[in-house]
Image (cartoon, rainbow, N blue to C red):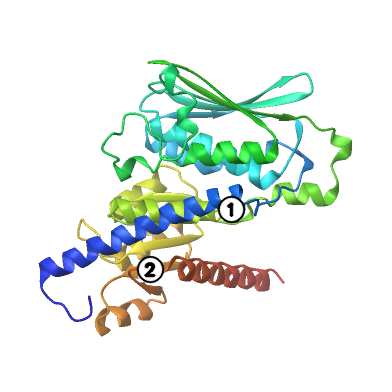
Amino acid sequence: MGKKVKDPEILKLVSLMDATLGAMSGMLNTLLDINQLEAGMVQPEVVTFPIEDMLLRLRTEFGYHAAANGLGLHVVPSGAHVRSDPALLEQLVRNLLSNAVKYTRHGKVLLGCRRHGDRLRIEVWDTGSGIPEEQLEAIFQEFHQIGNPARERSRGLGLGLAIVRRLADLLEHRVDVRSRLGSGSVFSVELPIGSPTDVQPQARRRSQTATSAVRAGVVLIVEDDPDVRDTLALVFRNSGFATLAARSGEDALETLTLGAPVPQLLVVDYDLPGGLNGLTVVERLREHAGQTIPAIILTGDISTATSSAINRLGFTRLVKPVKLDELMGVTQEMLQTRVQANAALDR
């Protein structure tokens, strides 16, 4: 439809429909995660591993997000070893940390561990507005959100804690929450402590690579539509990537200037506010980083001129509305190509 219609109002409507479909796709992906857990399609592989690797990855992943929200993030090191599925446990704690950063307006967020006999409690503290006592159990239900009666998409879907509860049940870990209105909340997950002598080499490697994409790369998303931006961030996070997000080229440049890690992939909308199109933004981000970062340009403009400009600069073009499986397939191909190129240079 967008190929034939030229009326600006109709094109705007098509664009809004594209964004809505993208947001729905993100919601369906999250619901799929829940359904897979409920249907028993996810089977944990419990091993003994050091918790410190996970803590360091989460500190890297959420450090900029906290700073961008004006929050302090403190991650307390731990030498403990635990028994769990490294990938599933990390997803559980990631959801807790994401909620803390998202809903804390002022103050700080703390991630740390406490030992209680043969158990370890991983705790996420925040200085947010707190949760009413009568809602402490309801917050783990699907689509339950506090203080969002209008269901604003910018404030999430209300599914993160539902996934936390299901992951905890699957792993047989205890999840708890304590909260005081006006003072903040503490979410925790309690799991068995393991012995360092039980750590096998393959288990250690699995722990270190449970979120290998996070270790291998950070994705910077530049998209002015909040629904599309949130959906893309959700898709990449669910695939194990650390994500940074910006609404404009200027915000993206500021993100790197503030000390965010250099991304290994740029996903940039072609039409951006502020007078900079996606091509210019990618060039400036590359110049700032001092390296040629792979880039995917998202565009609804199918004109020959735009396509030629994107191809001439060596960027990959995906036409909106983007199919999520296509996006992730292209992402893996680009990053794999880069890894192989770097390996060849090291020989």
Q: In what element is the residue under mark 2? A: loop
Q: Where residue 326 sits in the image (x, y, percent)? A: 47, 71
- Pick the quarter of the image with the C terminus: bottom right
Report the side of 132 relative to 217 (left or right): left
Residue 298 is at least partly visible in this image: yes
Quarter of the image for residue 170 reads top right
Q: Where residue 39 sits in the image (x, y, percent)? A: 61, 51
Packing grade of label 2 (10 A; few <14, some 14-19, many >=20) is some
Tell me what residue is drawn at x 58 percent, y 73 percent: 337
Quarter of the image for residue 116 reads top right
* Sooner in the amino-acid sequence: mark 1 or mark 2: 1
Three-letter code for the amino acid on which mark 2 is drawn: Val
Q: As displayed, is residue 311 above or below residue 182?
A: below
Which residue is at the front of the view, 151 or 339? Answer: 151
Q: Where residue 129 sits in the image (x, y, percent)? A: 37, 21
Number of the label disc, if any, that sits on residue 322 = 2
Residue 59 is at least partly visible in this image: no
Tell me what residue is drawn at x 30 percent, y 56 percent: 249
Kindly report the distance in space between the C-alpha atoms of the residues bearing marks 1 and 2. 24 Å
Number of the label disc, if any, that sits on residue 138 = none
Report the side of 170 relative to 130 (left or right): right
Q: Which residue is mark 1?
A: 36
